[in-house]
Image (spheres, helix red, strand yellow):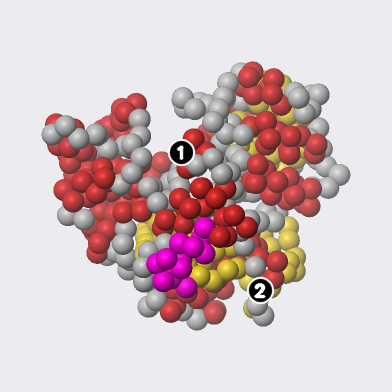
Amino acid sequence: MNYAECRKYIEDAQSLGRVLGLSGMQKLMKRLGNPQEELAFVHAAGTNGKGSVLAYVASALRNAGYRTGRYTSPAIFEYREIIEVDGEIISQEEFAAAFTPVAEAADAMAREGFPHPTPFEMETAAAFLHFRRKGCQIVALETGMGGETDATNLVTNTKVAILTSISLDHMDALGNSLEEIARCKAGIVKPGCRAVSTMQEPDAAREIARACAEKGVPCTWVDYRNARMISQDLHGQRFSFEGNTYDTRLSGLCQAENAAVAVKALEALGEMGFPMSREQMQEGIVRASWPGRFTLLRENPAVILDGAHNPQAARQLAASLEKCFAGKKLVYVMGMFRDKDYRQVASIMAPLAYEILTVETPKNPRALPADELARAVREFHPRVTAASSLGEAAALALERAGADGVVAVFGSLSFLGEISGFFTLR
């Protein structure tokens, strides 16, 4: 298969639905020779922040000289960015080479009467094959959803399990309470590893502590309040944590917390066979990049991209906008999935806005139509317009904001990459 054929195969598999649990993934990986068993992992789960934390961790590991793979989702600007080695995304030829045996194994499973693997399972399998072929010493691995039954949780050689902030999300699949969701996410903790968690709500903290105690795993709790901000602007920030100063190119008030969690995870990795100096850690953190998380796309007017698609992320985005753009005219472009708590996100974000434009995420069955989203948002703001396309939304947002205003594009990560092109062309 070539790259285009691989992408078509994955697109066709989208209609097959999903099967929770690891039995299908175990069958698939066995047919592929279980490449994940030859790799070491730092594994992250959580509702918000796991991608940013792993961006810092992977960057620092690369900077310290370790051949580092990274697997994350979803993609923002380019599909292949979900798989990278030493900061370089997988090429089309490499993706085809990794995915072809996965597709062959998936077809064989279907012929034998087993459920066909999902796109995420197949992408994860291809990533493991690629990381083994590239000789990765350590892989920064992000769960797709949940933890215990997530396809990535097939791995057994976890060196550090990271639990970022946990809140109510994906309740249809993970549970109806914070306790149930935390229990699922804490399933990434493996005997023999180290656990690192940010401070959590009491119900979530109890489940994480219970999981660690049952498996005999020491847990480091990171109090992000000890990360003291020194300076911040749209291009990054400087903060101190436990007597050391760190710089990051990532903006947004949550990034000091994310970087602090990464620091403790890197210290734990040092105890697990991946040591580095404080200077290597600091340099790695400042080199880290993670698009779509309070990302400044352009200026005059400023355009911010942020994947705030749940209430917790919305609160962080609102706080960052208020901190960085006090007194500025704020125009929103908002696109959400139907299965998200879009009403609460709107209620959190609306008070700061001058006007809100709603869009429908293209080519996604989970997308909420722009006019339906607009009706919901009007409960919280008087000036709401449903745009007919991403291009129209970008043009209207720039016009309404004016040169001195701010456009904040947020919601589902799946449309940020496509809409960004309409802003950069103007």
**Coordinates of residue 199 in the picture (x, y in percent):** 62, 62
Give me the C-alpha separation between circle 1 and circle 2. Answer: 36 Å
**Coordinates of residue 281 in the picture (x, y in percent):** 52, 74
Classified by dominant secondary structure, the portion drawn in magenta counts as helix
Viewer-side residue, 398 vs 278: 278
- Does 382 sit above or below residue 92? above
- Left or right: 178 as drawn, with respect to 148: right
Q: Quarter holding the C terminus? A: top right
- Mark 2, Cα crowd under 10 Å, few <14 / some 14-19 / many 20+, is some
- Does 238 sit above or below residue 133? below
> Which residue carries the number 1 mark?
173
**Coordinates of residue 373 in the picture (x, y in percent):** 64, 24
Q: Which residues are magenta?
A: 207-218
> Which residue carries the number 2 mark?
241
Q: Quarter holding the N terminus? A: top left
- Mark 1, Cα crowd under 10 Å, few <14 / some 14-19 / many 20+, is few
Q: In percent of the image, x 69 and y 71: which residue is there? A: 226
Q: In percent of the image, x 27 and y 32: which residue is there? A: 9
Residue 62 seen in the figure: no
**Coordinates of residue 423 in the picture (x, y in percent):** 62, 35
Return the residue found at the far right.
327
Identity, as a three-letter code, of the amino acid under mark 1: Ala
